[in-house]
Image (cartoon, helix red, strand yellow):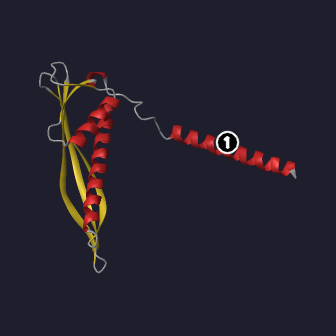
């Protein structure tokens, strides 16, 4: 009886070992990298962030992600590349309205515009736009829930936009 249990235990251990090996191999094969393993180009490590139109949470998140990417954020400096960033909410669209159920699907849009200039004011990168969208379900019986959904979706879209900005900056 013990030998059957030992064989079963050995079999499950070997199976687990094979699964873990395949998982690690597949992650390395698909381009998976640890966060922060890629850095900004050297000419962009000294940055002055011009983001007056961002709200506080957007500004904090953007500064955090830029620092994680290797940026040294400066206040007004003559040798810092200037990164101008604006995030805007675009008009939402109602996609589907199911009659009788009181539910509909609303698509939210947000865009991030950015540009880079030299300390002298010369354009390094003309304005680029990143657009993201997200669908939320609206239940006419739960008005308070819709506002919470909108706020959560807006925060999620902001994170996606900022992550995409950092990705694009790293690959200039």
Q: Is residue 128 visible?
A: no
Residue 59: percent from left, percent from top: 23, 38
Q: Is residue 136 visible?
A: yes
Relative to 110, residue 135 above or below? below
Q: Residue at 31% across / 45% down in the picture?
A: 159
Q: Residue at 28% across / 73% down in the picture?
A: 141
Q: Residue at 32% across / 40% down in the picture?
A: 163
Where the C terminus falls, by quadrant? top left
Between residue 139 and residue 40, name the one nearer to us. 139
Residue 112: percent from left, percent from top: 22, 44
Label 1 sits on residue? 17
Residue 70: image quadrant is top left
In the displayed structure image, the side of residue 104 where residue 127 appears, left or right: left
Residue 64: percent from left, percent from top: 30, 34
Residue 85: image quadrant is top left
Relative to 25, residue 123 above or below? above
């Amino acid at each position: 009886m013990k030998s059957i249990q030992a064989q079963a235990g050995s079999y499950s251990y070997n199976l687990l070992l094979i699964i873990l090996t395949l998982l690690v191999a597949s992650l390395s094969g698909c381009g998976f990298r640890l966060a922060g393993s890629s850095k900004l180009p050297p000419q962009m490590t000294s940055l002055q962030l011009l983001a007056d139109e961002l709200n506080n949470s957007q500004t904090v998140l953007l500064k955090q992600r830029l620092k994680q990417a290797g940026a040294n954020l400066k206040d007004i400096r003559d040798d810092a590349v200037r990164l101008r960033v604006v995030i805007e909410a675009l008009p939402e669209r109602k996609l589907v309205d199911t009659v009788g159920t009181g539910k509909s699907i609303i698509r939210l849009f947000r865009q991030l515009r950015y540009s880079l200039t030299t300390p002298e004011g010369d354009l390094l990168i003309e304005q680029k736009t990143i657009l993201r969208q997200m669908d939320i379900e609206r239940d006419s019986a739960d008005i308070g829930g819709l506002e919470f959904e909108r706020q959560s979706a807006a925060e999620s879209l902001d994170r996606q936009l900022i992550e995409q900005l950092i990705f694009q900056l790293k690959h200039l």
